[in-house]
Image (cartoon, coloured by chain):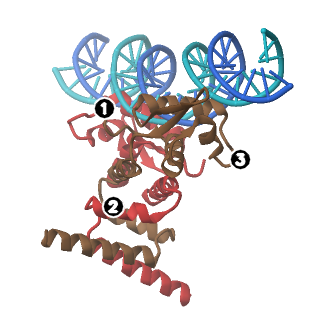
Chain colours: A red, B brown, C blue, D cyan
DNA sequence: TTGGTCCTACGACATCTGTCGTAAGCTAGC
DNA sequence: GCTAGCTTACGACAGATGTCGTAGGACCAA
C-alpha cells in the first residue's frame, strides 16, 4: 500500500502532523477547532488506523504517551488526492477548471502562477 | 438533501444518464466497459439508491422495464464534487494547481482557457 | 503509598459503498 | 396457453469510515 487512500478525517489528522511535526494523540485532537471536535478516542482510533496504513508511525514516547509522526508526505498525499479527483472527471480538466473559476475559487494570480510554472516546466524539458 | 453526495460508482451511473439520456438498468450496465463491468444487480442496487437520494427518477416504462432519468444536472453534481475536493485542501488553490501542473494534467490550452474565462467573468461583473 | 488523572488498547456499532444472489413477476414467441 | 428469458424487488454481506465507551495500566503529586 504505497499510496493508501486517506479519508477526510484521516487527512485532517495528517494535516496536524504535517503542520506541527510529531504530536501526541491529545495534541492532534486539540488541533481540531473546538466546534465539532471529535472525541479523544475517535482521534485515537483514526490514528491507529493510519498507523496500520503506514501513513504515520510512533516516533517516541513522552511519559506514557506515544508521539506520532507522518510517514507519508503532504505532497504524496495531495498527489493521490488530485489523481483520485481527476479520475472522477474522466481526466478531463476543462469542466474542472470551469467549475473552479465560476465558483470564484481561482484568481488571476492563481492562473498567472500556473502559467509561470508551466513555462518553467516546458523549459526544463527542452533544456535538460 | 438538495445536493446529495455521490460516490464514484454512483457518478458513473449518472454519467451514463447525462450522456445518453433516460436509460433502462440494462443499458446503464452496458455503458460500463466490458472489462470490470459490475453485475446487473449491482447496477440495479445503485440505481435504486440514487432514486432514494433523488438523484434520478423513473421516467416511464417500456415493456416491464423501468426507464430512469437524471434529476440532478451534471453541473450541479460537479459543483458539489469540486467543493468537496477543495475543502480537503482547506480551500487553498495553490497546492492544487501546482499538483495539477506537475502531473501534467494541466496544459497551456487549459490555462489559456482559464484566463479567458476569468476575463469574461471580470467583465461581466464590471459591466452588468 | 495512594489517589486522581491521563493514556492505551480494544471492542462495539451505525452508515455508506460496492457486490451479488434469489425468488417471483411479466412478456413475447411458439 | 405455456415456457424461456429478462425484470424487479429484496435481502445479505464485507470493508471502510466515523463515533465512542470502557477497562486497566502508568505517572505524578501530596
**Of discs 1 and 3, which sits in the foreground?**
3
Instruction: Name the element at disc 3.
Output: loop
Q: Is residue B8 left or right of residue A103?
A: right
**How far is disc 1 from disc 3 in space, using C-alphas?**
43 Å
**How far is disc 3 from disc 2 in space, using C-alphas?**
33 Å
Q: Chain of mark 1?
A: A
Q: Position of residue A6 (x, y in %)?
A: 47, 45
Q: Which residue is mark 2?
A: A100
User: Does the rendering let one see residue A5?
Assistant: no
The quadrant of the rendering that contains the N terminus of chain B is: top left
Q: Which residue is mark 1?
A: A38
Say above or below: A7 vs A83: above
Q: Position of residue A28 (x, y in %)?
A: 32, 41
Check if mark 1's residue and mark 3's residue have beta carbons within 8 Å: no
Q: Which residue is mark 3?
A: B34
Instruction: Name the element at disc 2.
Output: helix
User: Does the rendering let one see residue A122?
Assistant: yes
Q: Position of residue B57 (x, y in %)?
A: 44, 33
Graded by Cα atoms within 10 Å as few (under 14), some (14 to 19) or many (20 or more), the crowding at tag 2 reads: some
Q: Who is closer to the viewer here, B79 or B99?
A: B79
Badge 3 and badge 2 in a common chain: no
Seen at 19% across and 70% down, the residue is B124
Say above or below: A95 vs B117: above
Badge 1 and badge 3 in a common chain: no
Amino acid at each position: 500500500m504505497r499510496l493508501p487512500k486517506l479519508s477526510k478525517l484521516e487527512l485532517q489528522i495528517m494535516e496536524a502532523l504535517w503542520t506541527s511535526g510529531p504530536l501526541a494523540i491529545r495534541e492532534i485532537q486539540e488541533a481540531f477547532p473546538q466546534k465539532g471536535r471529535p472525541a479523544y478516542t475517535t482521534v485515537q482510533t483514526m490514528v491507529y488506523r493510519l498507523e496500520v496504513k503506514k501513513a504515520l508511525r510512533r516516533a517516541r514516547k513522552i511519559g506514557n504517551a506515544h508521539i506520532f509522526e507522518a510517514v507519508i508526505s503532504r505532497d504524496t498525499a495531495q498527489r493521490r488526492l488530485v489523481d483520485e479527483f481527476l479520475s472522477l472527471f474522466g481526466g478531463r480538466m476543462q469542466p474542472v477548471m470551469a467549475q473552479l473559476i465560476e465558483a470564484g475559487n481561482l484568481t488571476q494570480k492563481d492562473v498567472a502562477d500556473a502559467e509561470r510554472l508551466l513555462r518553467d516546466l516546458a523549459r526544463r524539458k527542452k533544456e535538460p
